[in-house]
Image (tube, rainbow, N blue to C red):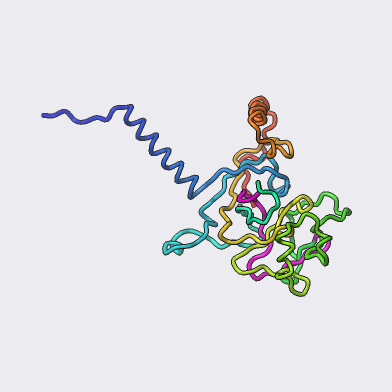
Amino acid sequence: MAEPYHKSSLRDTLESLVVTVILAIFGTTFVVQAFKIPTGSMKNTLLIGDHLLVNKFAFAYPEGPLARFLPYRKIHRDDVVVFKFPGGSEDPQEEGEHFVKRVIGLPGDRIRVVNRKVFVNGEAVSEPFVRNIDPGEVRPGDDFPPVMWGELQGATSEWQAEFQNYVKDGQIVVPPNEYFVMGDNREESWDSRFWGFVPRKLVSGRPLIIYWSFETPRGQYEQTSFGDRVHQMENMIVHFFTETRWRRTFKLIH
C-alpha cells in the first residue's frame, strides 16, 4: 500500500507566503490602504506625520452591475475623504496626488463663507472640528465666493476662468456628482475655494484610524532626494519611542 502523501514544510511555507502576498495585494488594491499626512491642512483632526488606514471600499465609485450588492455608502456632509487631486494646478507634482479634506458641500448645495463662518443652503453650520489660529487676521478664503478674484490669492487660473459659472445669488452651487471640500485648518488649507470641486469618481476612500503618528517637520514631504530619505529613516529609528505620538495611536477619525 502506498504511503500517504505529505507536503514538505518548505512547500507549506511557500504556499502560505503566496497566499499572504495575494491577500495583501487584493487588500491594498480594493479594501484598505495606508496613507501618510504630509501637511497641516487638517489640523487638529489630522497632524503631519499621522499614518492612516483608509477604507477604499466604502466610497469606491459605484459602477457596474454588482454595485448595488456591495457595501458602498453615500458620501455625507462632514465626511473626511481621500481623493485624487482633480487637476488644474500650476504645480505638475500635484496632478493625480492624493489629498485628504472634509466634505462641506454635497451636489446641489449652496455654499457661502462669511468671515470664516460657513453657510450651507442659507443656514450657518456648526463645525467644532475647525481650527483657527488667528481669528483677527484677514486671510484669502475667509470670505467666499469672492467679489473680485484679486481677493483670493492662490486660486488656480483654471478655477478663476470657470468659477463664475457656478455662482448664484452670492453663493457657489455644487454641481451634480461633485463635492465642495475644505481642510479643518482653514487658514492653511488649499482646497475647493482655490481649485474647485471634487468629482465623485475621484473619491477613493474614507480614513478610518490612525495606526501610528510620528512627530514630523513641516515641509518634509517636499524632501524627496535619496539623501533626504536616508536621513529621515535614521531620524525615525533613533527617535521612534520619544517622537511617536502614542496618544494618537489607534485613534478613530471623525
The residue positioned farthest toward the right in the image shown: 136
Most extreme residue toward the bottom, as rendered? 169
Residue at 36 percent across and 30 percent down: it is 13
In percent of width and height, residue 25 lies at 46, 43
Percent across and percent down for residue 124 are 76, 66
Count of numbered tags: 0
Q: Is residue 124 above or below residue 28?
A: below
Q: Position of residue 23 (x, y in %)?
A: 43, 42
User: Residue drawn at (67%, 27%), measured in percent from left and top?
Assistant: 231
Taking the spot 67% from the left edge, 56% from the top edge, the residue there is 88
Eyeballing the image, is 28 above or below 143? above
Residue closest to the eye, 212 or 252: 212
- Say if residue 240 shows up in the picture: no
12 over 138 or under it: above or below: above
Q: Is 245 one of the magenta-colored residues?
A: no
Question: Which quarter of the figure has residue 110?
Answer: bottom right
Does 83 sit left or right of 31 as displayed? right
Closer to the camera in the image, 129 or 225: 225
**Is-magenta flag for residue 99?**
yes
- The x and y percentages for residue 248 are 66, 40
Q: Is residue 107 visible in the rendered structure shown here?
A: yes
Q: In the image as oriented, which residue stretches furthest toward the left? A: 1
Quarter of the figure that contains the N terminus: top left
Q: Quadrant of residue 103?
A: bottom right
Extent of the magenta region: 94-116
Q: Quadrant of residue 225?
A: top right
